[in-house]
Image (cartoon, rainbow, N blue to C red):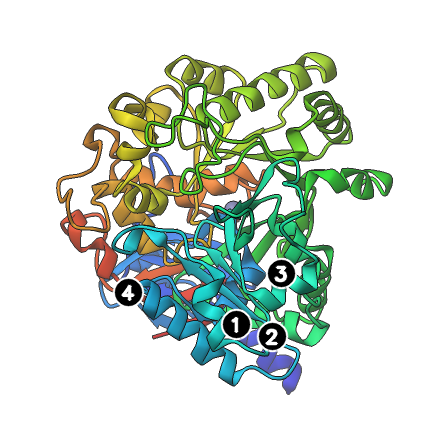
Amino acid sequence: MLGAATAAGACARGSQPAADLIVTHGAVWTGERGQPDATGVAIVADRIAAVGTADDIERWHGPNTRVVDAGGRRVVPGFNDAHVHFVDGGRQLDNVDLKDADSVQEFAQRIGNRAKSVRQGEWVLGGDWDDQRWTPAQLPDKALVDPLTPATPVFVNRYDGHMALANSIALRLAGVTAKTPDPPGGTIVRDPHGNPTGVLKDAAMNFVAKVIPPLTREQRTRAVKRALEHAASIGITSVQDMNPEYDDVAVYAELANRGELTTRIYAAPLETGWQDFAKIGVHRSFGSAWLRVGAVKGYADGSLGSTTAYFFQPYTDAPSTRGLLSDEMQSIDEMRSRLVGADKAGLQLCIHAIGDAGISYILDLFADVTRINGARDRRFRIEHAQHIAPKDFDRFASLGVIASVQPYHAIDDGRWAERRIGPERIKTTYAFRTLLDKGVRLALGTDWYVAPLNPMLTLHAATTRATLDGKNPNGWVPEQKITIGEAVAAYTSGSAYAEFQEAEKGTIARGKLADLVVLSDDVFSIPPARIKDVQVMTTIVGGRVVYQR
Ligand SMILES: [Zn+2]
């Protein structure tokens, strides 16, 4: 009897198998060129079996088919965030939150409060403070937090991750004193007497970072689960995880084996470890539909907010510097030989580059890699690609480099970027329109934890360029806006292309993985200013409903 019931369930109409799940009454944006909007989707196991009209889909409706009634709402492919720091994001959900601390007093108070609640020996971490919110804008000083944290080490980062403030206990544990020299690629900020203020920039952060006790497996797993839950609730069905620790990947693998991932992960550990992958023959996009490896992530420079992004010309508001090349780039020849080696092994290269000179150097290196290893479909990526020299757009296109960009940074930095780099350079800053017009492929993401993971904020940013301070309601450098259709495509099929998965996901099409999202409002027809308030009603990953509002 059981066998007969199963057979009937699998067979709705003659030889037509029944769907496990159907989505009905949707306004389905498939992302497929030439495919008209559909109203329904039929899913068998983890794949899309049919996309079409109500009649087309009803034929798949069997007795055991689960129905998700979209109620006329917009259905889109699941969002694929091409650049996240997934474990840091998950931890951030539990960390001290300084992002909206609007004064140094508030900043110090929140750290003090957090210190009271952590267990003995634990650190106060996270933060994401933003000195540009304070009046006057000033770097914090450990003297502010020392009295409030007499027994707790504190190491709180600026929101861009390129500076952090350590309190005196943390500096002592790290052995940083007035006598400690600046490391290559980093700065110990000092007072007029030469004593460290607690602020460490870029490579100098390593002094403290390396004495923070590593996460236990249990803490790491908890962070991943928090991140997965958050991603599901906002329609993120795939993430591309930049420079995870190997232990993070081990947790993903464990969860993947247990069938507990609800977001697909492509992990790109640091390029300095490329041989670890090459030794066992792992190459780009190797793995399962849930977990892939085979990309490596590197750094060319720092960030605009920390004045460490590397430019051809000095900073407008800090004329003594034009930024810093990363420690990885301190010998460009060594960087080149690592990138050539990694590429030769079939690994994909994803390099963080923000300043125009940092980007230009990486394009040079990518050209070298191509010349040395020969032409093939390798999909180089520049992560962030924020400030592009006008001469370099064509090189982006001709080398086939993907611009992996985070529009939310544009509306955040847009508050102060012109002060920092002047009126000329901002014309090709976060230049999404120019990139598309030049034929460069975009992959969209957030850089979460650095920016919020919510894809609606990114779509809003890309289409409005309305800065967070409300001062540019019609857009900051408005000629660089892109349309909502372009933004959604870049966030779905564009990001899938960036991980060599465009045949598997990124559009709603027969045969592809059944990753889709029902939205509360139609992002394609509401005014762009309202996109940021759109909610996710349902998230489906691999045919499973992983979130329902
Ligand atoms: Zn990042």
How far from the left and from the top, in percent, is residue 379? 58, 29
Judged from this view, the residue extending furthest toward the front is 193
How far from the left and from the top, in percent, is residue 141? 45, 58
Indicate the amino acid at tag 4. Gln
Residue visible at 18% across and 48% down in the picture? 528
Total marks drawn? Answer: 4
Q: Foreground: 138 or 252?
A: 138
Q: Residue 375's image quarter?
A: top right
Report how far apart the C-alphas of labels 3 and 2 lie in the structure.
28 Å
Indicate the amino acid at tag 1. Arg
Q: Provide the secondary structure element on which disc 2 rests.
A: helix
Pointer 4: what residue? 535
Q: Earlier in the sequence, mark 3 or mark 2?
A: 3
Pointer 1: what residue? 226
How far from the left and from the top, in percent, is residue 412? 31, 47
How far from the left and from the top, in percent, is residue 501? 56, 42
Q: Would you call the spot at circle 1 few (<14 residues within 10 Å), some (14-19), or many (20 or more)? A: some
Pointer 2: what residue? 222
